[in-house]
Image (cartoon, rainbow, N blue to C red):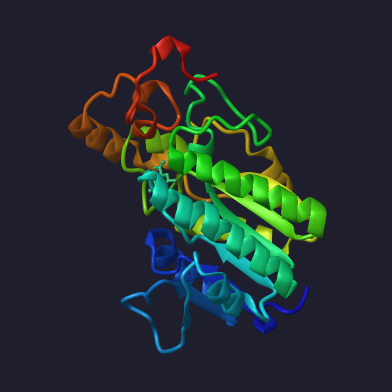
């Protein structure tokens, strides 16, 4: 692996919520970082390099990743949405990204998957990275698709890919559900560094969560790869519970890990949902 300062690493989705939180943390680690999104982040710094690219345009994505050795792929539609929006950004866009990366000889991809790929597991169940996907939304299905693409490009083309099933990124957990799935920006950057740098990476699915006592996820593989989260959701429990009291109950969403992504548009018998 070339020296970090010599590496051209592309960050898609740089203007989005997570991109905005981690840009300042990535900048000193990877001086060759290239930021990308459809439009430049409002607070782009003079020291930051930005290349506009539309993920649905294969030519633009190919231009973006040319000469890159790694990609951190956060770009796409980041919540539930109409099928066409998900299809364009997260299915076609994700395919375009992996295919352009293969053609450009990109060696490492860190893919921002989501807890919503497995959102229909009940909160009573502890799951590891090897469970069958149980998406809770069209968005969750698109993240499962991205994980499948990642496996294909790893097995067939030797790309080292790390899928991070990200919980909820922010300075602190914002409700009771997030006490289980919260991840600090610093801990997310730790996981991204593992994906970019750890010599053993072939295909990995890791959970993007801090050191949360109420976690539903077995993240032993991340720990085996050196992950040492410093964020602790319990330190913020009082705040999270106060916020939860303002939200109120969600009889379906509160049973499942994906929360309101599960209850939205739900028309099943609750006892027949989930695993
Ligand atoms: C996600 O995958 C979304 O991108 C984010 O907006 C949150 O909804 C998060 O999951 C969550 O589950 O809290």
Q: Residue at x 76, y 54 (%)?
A: 154
x, y percent for residue 125: 55, 21
The residue lying furthest to the left in this view is: 246
Q: Number of callouts in the render?
A: 0
Q: Is residue 130 visible?
A: yes
Residue drawn at x 55%, y 62% is: 73
Nearest to the observer: residue 127 or residue 25: 127
What is the x, y in percent for residue 238? 29, 36
Residue 17 vs 115, above or below: the answer is below
Residue 90: x and y in percent read 50, 53
User: Toward which corner of the image does residue 103 lie, by quadrant?
Assistant: bottom right
Residue at x 46% of width, y 81% of height? 50
Residue 28 in sight in this render: no
In the displayed structure, 98 sits above or below 59; it is above
Decide if residue 179 is on the left or right side of residue 220: left
Which quadrant of the rendered structure holds the C terminus?
top right
Q: Nearer the viewer, residue 252 or 153?
A: 153
Q: Position of residue 205 (x, y in %)?
A: 66, 45
| Quarter of the rendering containing residue 39 | bottom left
* Left or right relative to 135: residue 150: right
* Above or below, comparing residue 127 to residue 100 in the picture: above
Q: Residue furthest bottom?
A: 46
Quadrant of the rendering where the N terminus is positioned: bottom right
Ligand 1 sits in which quadrant?
top left
């Amino acid at each position: 692996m070339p020296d970090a300062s010599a590496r051209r690493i592309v960050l898609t989705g740089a203007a989005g919520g997570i991109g905005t939180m981690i840009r300042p943390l990535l900048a000193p680690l990877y001086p060759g970082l290239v930021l990308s999104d459809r439009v430049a982040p409002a607070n782009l710094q003079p020291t930051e390099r930005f290349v506009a690219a539309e993920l649905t345009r294969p030519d633009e994505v190919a231009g973006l990743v040319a000469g890159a050795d790694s990609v951190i792929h956060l770009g796409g539609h980041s919540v539930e949405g109409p099928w066409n929006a998900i299809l364009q950004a997260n299915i076609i866009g994700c395919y375009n990204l992996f295919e352009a990366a293969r053609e450009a000889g990109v060696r490492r991809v860190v893919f921002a998957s989501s807890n919503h790929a497995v959102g229909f597991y009940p909160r009573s169940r502890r799951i590891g990275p090897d469970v069958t996907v149980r998406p809770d939304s069209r968005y969750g299905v698109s993240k499962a698709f991205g994980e499948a693409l990642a496996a294909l490009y790893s097995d067939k083309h030797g790309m080292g890919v790390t899928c991070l099933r990200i919980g909820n990124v922010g300075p602190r957990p914002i409700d009771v559900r997030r006490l289980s799935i919260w991840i600090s920006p610093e801990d997310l950057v730790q996981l991204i560094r593992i994906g970019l740098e750890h010599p053993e990476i072939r295909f990995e699915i890791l959970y993007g969560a801090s050191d949360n006592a109420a976690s539903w996820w077995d993240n032993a593989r991340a720990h085996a790869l050196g992950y040492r989260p410093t964020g602790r959701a319990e330190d913020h429990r009082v705040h999270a519970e106060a916020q939860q009291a303002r939200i109120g109950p969600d009889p379906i969403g509160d049973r499942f890990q994906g929360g309101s992504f599960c209850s939205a548009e739900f028309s099943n018998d609750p006892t027949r949902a989930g695993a």
